[in-house]
Image: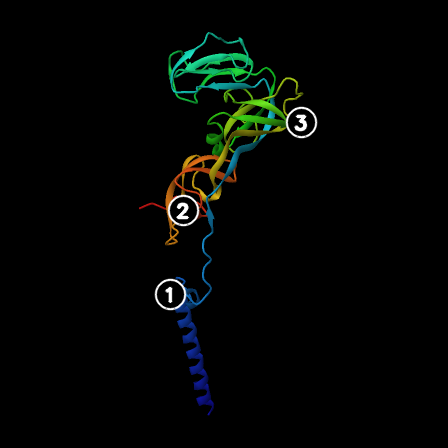
Amino acid sequence: MIRRRARIIAAVSVAALVAVAFSAWQFLGPAGDPRPSRAAGGSGPAAAPPRTVAVTRGDLTEVVTLHAVVNALPQFSVLAAAPGPLARTDVGPGQAVAAGRPLFTSGGVGVAAPAAGTFVKWLVAEGAPVSAGVPVAVVAYPGFAETASVPPDAAYRLLDGRISARAMITGGPGPFDCALVQAYADAPGNSNATGAGPAGVPVVCAIPPEVPALAGLSGTVAVKSATAKDVLLLPVEAVAGAAAHGEVSRVDPRSGRAEVVKVGLGISNGTLIQITEGLAQGDVVLGTAPPLDARLP
């Protein structure tokens, strides 16, 4: 009787072990790879649909706020405005130049000193071909300036066209307008003038002579490059790209499927970005930008 009961208990134990092993194999698979449970196959809750946003229309002002440091006697570059051969004026090192004084032409387009200062040197020889945006001359500002670094993701937007700036010195006078120019990177004190941080395009905000300042003080520069009225807008996180052109995942209103399309890009304020072509008002796109491999073969 005792032996029979022992056999029954042993049989039940073996059956239980087999059941556990079979269940584990069903979940993990022969090589230990997880397998979806039946609940994940359709009887469980459905996955949430991806977030979408619609193209809207509105006004947009491009403004970027930069941390800055006050430096004395900063040097700045004067850039070519158009591609072509360089024609220099007779200004030479050590000469005083007033704001607005013509310095050179490139590709037939004249360029003047953006701020008053002392002419330091030419960077390009007379008659040499230059591209737009190339530093041609160096001028030293005779007072103080706030030097800052434009982040790489904003440099294309801010430095492509006419810009204006207002600045403040921490603990100092109220905001003042200033001429914003590109710093001459090889000048003493201009490199890493803003302290630790990611690399960017160094710029100089010339402090007016009537504003008291001391070298080493910190400050803030707000840069405004453009304003666009009644333009198409999307959140920046929905767009792959930040300048000139990009891509979005447009949702087909009939099928509901998303396809990657190219779009033209304008200005941005860091939250919204202007869509210049490729979409129409009311078009719906996915709320996240398409990944880089979205259209790889």
| Picture residue at 44% right of the left edge, 86% below the top | 8
Q: Where is 109 relative to 231, above or below?
A: above
Q: Residue furthest left?
A: 297
Q: Nearer the viewer, residue 217 or 115?
A: 115
List the residue tagged with mark 1.
29
Q: Residue at x 56, y 27 (%)?
A: 148
* Residue at 54% from the left image edge and 20% from the top image edge: 188
Q: Mark 2 Cα within 10 Å, few/some/many (few <14, many 20+)? A: many
Judged from the image, the secondary structure of the residue bearing numbered disc 1 is loop
Quarter residue 245 falls in: top left
Q: Which residue is mark 3?
A: 174
Give x and y (percent) for residue 84: 37, 17
Q: Which residue is mark 2?
A: 249
Which amino acid, by three-letter code, is at mark 3?
Answer: Gly
Quick one: 72 or 259, which is closer to the camera?
Answer: 259
Q: How is the image coloured?
A: rainbow
- Which of pointers 1 and 3 lies earlier in the amino acid sequence? 1
Picture layout, residue 261 above or below residue 39:
above
Can the viewer see residue 201?
yes
3D distance between C-alphas at marks 1 and 3: 70 Å
